[in-house]
Each structure stands twice: as structure tokens, then as C-alpha cells.
Amino acid sequence: MKRGGAALVAAFLLAAPCGVMGAENLAIKPGLDYSDHNKKQGPLITGDHMDEGLVEGMPNYIFFYMEKCYNAKRQALITVHMYEKYKGRVHFVVVNLDKPMSQAQKTLKQKYCAEVVPHETVLDKKGTVVFDYTGETDQPTLDGWIDYALRVSGGGEQPTRAANK
């Protein structure tokens, strides 16, 4: 019965319309304390539609974290910067492993994250993994992989300064 349930969930996720909202209006939790390495402070990122899963037909960026992880706090800041740069072109999924998860998030956790955080996964529009990493990832590296996912997905890149001259 578990296999049938998992197949049903997978079928639902694949059949979900592309218009499903992703995490929006992402922001770092006000007053987040970076001075304490193991201080649990609640959700690191705030926003709307935080319980959503993947959206088919566009690149997806998935960020898994735990609230007391110091490295996840720093990765959360990078994730919000990435959201500001790519919103509307990349679907963002933020999964707080310390809170109850939606079924879609549980499925993503099972598939991509072994509860070692921070963990970032980038998928192209077909759902193919183009980047999957446990640990902190700097913004230039993520920019490169997201730009790649956009290129292979036909989403193009933002113009660079050199292109605007």
C-alpha cells in the first residue's frame, strides 16, 4: 500500500499545474542571531506559500535547513539573495526540517535530503538535478548552476553589464 500511496503522490506532483505558487516574498527572519552556533531561533526565512512543492515546467531551487544550524543561517541569507535575483524565473522551495512539512515537502526531503543541512538542490524545468549539495554553497556557484538550469530550460539569463553596454 505504501508504494501505491507514493505513486499517487508522485502522479499528483507531476500533474500539478504550473500556476501553483511557490515560496514568495522571501525574507530573512528579522533579528536573526548569527553569533550563536547552536541557538534555535525559529524559521530562518519568512515568506508566503512556504509549504509548496515543485512546479513543473520551470527550474526549481530547493533549500533544506534546520533552525539551529549556523551554516544554514548563512545559506538562508544567500537563498534570499538568490530569490530576489531570480524570482519569476525560478521556483523556490524552502523546507524547514524542524517544522511539520506538507506532503510535497516530505516527498522532496525523502528524495533529496538526508537531514544533513544546509542542503541545496537545483532542478531544470524537466526535473533533472543539475546541482545537489550538502553544505554551504556560495552565491557565485549557485548563480552558475541556476543560470545553467535556465539555459537548458530555455529560460535565458538576465542581461549582464557587458551585454548592456
Image (cartoon, grey):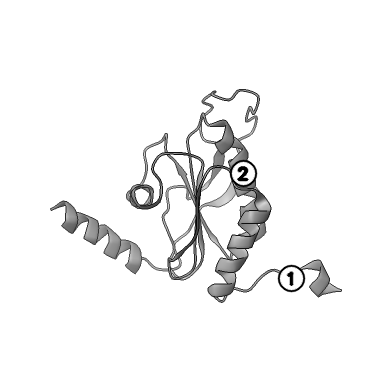
Image point (41%, 55%), residue name: 53
- Cα distance in 3D space between marks 2 and 1: 25 Å
Image spot of residue 70 (x, y percent): 57, 31
Q: Residues within 10 Å of mark 2 (few under 14, many from 20)?
A: some
Q: Amino acid at mark 2?
A: Ala
Front-lying residue, 121 or 92: 121
Image spot of residue 1 (x, y percent): 12, 53
Image point (43%, 66%), residue name: 127
Q: Identify the mark nearer the N-term, 2 or 1.
A: 2
Q: Which residue is mark 1?
A: 159
Image spot of residue 38 (x, y percent): 54, 24
Image point (80%, 74%), residue name: 163
Image spot of residue 74 (x, y percent): 62, 38
Q: Secondary structure at mark 2?
A: strand
Q: Locate the C terminus by quadrant.
A: bottom right
Q: Which residue is mark 2?
A: 27
For residue 98, the mark is none
